[in-house]
Amino acid sequence: MDIPRNVKIVIVVLLCAILGLACSADGTSTGPKESTENYSVSPTPTPTPIPTPTSTPVDSKQVAPQFVAGPSGLGDSYFPNLGNGGYDVERYIIEVQWDPEEKWLSGSTVIEAKSTENLSSFNVDFAPMQISEVTVNGVRADFTAEENEVVVIPSEGILSGTDFNARFVYEGSPSLFCWDTNCSLLGGWYNLEEGAFVAGEPSSSLAWHPVNDHPRDRAQFRIEMTLPSNLDFVTNGVFLSKTQNGEVSTWVYETVHPRAPYLTTLAIGEFEEVIAPSVDDLPIRHWIEEGIVRENLAYLDYDKMVSVLTDLFGPYPFDTYGVLVLNHQLGFALETQTLSLFGRDTFEIESIHIHELAHQWFGNHLTVESWSEIWLNEGFATYSEALYYQAIYPEFDIYQYLIAGFGGRESQLLGGIPPGDPGPESLFSASVYYRGALTLHALRLTIGDEAFFTSLREYADQFGGTNVSTDDFIQLVEKISGEALGDFFDRWLLGPVLPEMPS
Ligand code: ARG
Ligand code: ZN
């Protein structure tokens, strides 16, 4: 999580670190310095128009089906190029090799998918790497690649409702991308002096494998990475095997619980696996990078965190959990599925551990239908911190906690980023986190504890495994509370100023 009131400073400091600039404490650049950390940043992808899907005419006499080009986006109003239409991915099978000397990735990705239209072509999101071959169902396909879109033209059309697979063979030097115009949202493949890692929201996956990169298309993953045997490879999901073959080793991980592609992380370096006691039947495994003092994690009570959140929201939705701690100034943490990512700047902050764990329900098990709904992730995860502390300390003052996190009430009366529609530039602003959480607190005071907590559990239960919108949540709460809440949510999520907290 960002420390949102310091969000600009954090980002500037992060950029300073990235660009190898020496920076003063307030994050302003004080000039270049020698650095071997030199990330390449690609420009913001330019939105391309989304073709309107043509519907197939139904005609009993018709013999030849009509085929259309699959859309190059999913119509996300903030990030129109992320994701693609016309198919739904079921599984990614990624088999790649990493050369740390050359910072070179090579290998293949197979996308197993089902078509949702008669497709003459379809798109995948993928960074500019060299693609040597694309096959669809084993047959050579044509393709064109530009910006972050690859258009695949199979030798014959794919009928709607068909299972198909597309295999991409590629190589290149993966890099970072900006997701907004002022580059406050950075994501992709980070090269460190020794190792590397992948992180980013709303996207990072397209930096290293072809993908339908939108939370609306969740899929299973099998990731196979081959790299020099002196390095470790860590990614989400369940570790299956490590096979040494001379100088190199191949690591295999698999995830059967579908996940949104931005929730994949990976790290290359020297890591220690820390197996913490299981919480009920949930295995807890952390991966700690060399140089991080692992004793500094020992105070974290994952047993308590999992049991408090489980009592509030229902069963933990996946089969494993843990944190991946990089010895790197990350500037944020990320709720990467089953393996939340922390840097050395965030791993000692308990509230962020609660926050990322809460995202496993709100953000990962329930994913947003579009990025404009981000408060359903961040507002809920932030409110979960407060709920956890209230469970531990019954006198805990939730309002004070949230208003302080927001940067004080006064400042917020002035600048109103509406958490219900913050815009891509303010996706992770304080308002999304804290006004989002204050909205839930105001809701609780309005409808009462019983209806409120029933709503949270029902919401997680009914919408787990699907995509959600604010309307879904409002309808559910209206049903449970019997109150009309349209105006309430409009004022709290979209109004120009922070409303008064109901007493
Ligand atoms: N979802 C993450 C969290 O709140 C936020 C990631 C923000 N990323 C960034 N580069 N600021 O846990
Ligand atoms: Zn968050």
Image (cartoon, grey):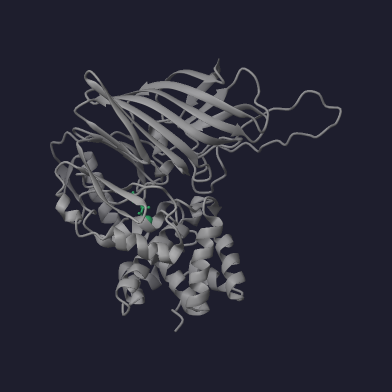
Query: Residue 429: image x %, image y %?
Result: 37, 59
Q: Along the line of sight, which residue is nearer the eye, 320 or 70?
A: 320
Residue occupying the point 52% across, 77% down: 447
Q: Is residue 191 visible?
A: no
Q: Quadrant of the N terminus?
A: bottom left
Percent position of residue 387, x then y: 37, 69
Q: Quadrant of residue 205?
A: top left
Q: Quadrant of ligand 2?
A: bottom left
Q: Position of residue 268 (x, y in %)?
A: 26, 34
Residue at (56%, 42%) from the top-left corner? Answer: 74
Please tell me in which quadrant of the rendered image residue 17 appears: top left
Residue 99 lies in what quarter of the image? Answer: top left
Which residue is at 41% across, 39% downward? 44
Q: Relative to 186, does residue 361 appear above or below in the rendering?
A: below
Above or below for 168 versus 309: above
Please determine whether, in this image, residue 297 is positioned above or below residue 101: below
Quadrant of the snapshot with the C terminus:
bottom left
| Left or right placement of residue 458 versus residue 303 in this view | right
Question: Total of numbered circles in the picture?
Answer: 0
Tell me if residue 306 comes above or below residue 270 in the rendering.
below
Evaluate whether residue 97 shows in this view.
Answer: yes
The answer to which of 49 and 380 lies nearer the viewer is 380
Q: Kindly give the residue lying farthest to the bottom in the view shown.
A: 503
Q: Position of residue 459 (x, y in %)?
A: 53, 62
Q: In the orientation shown, which residue stands out farthest toward the right?
A: 61
Relative to the observer, which residue lies in front, 408 or 377?
A: 377
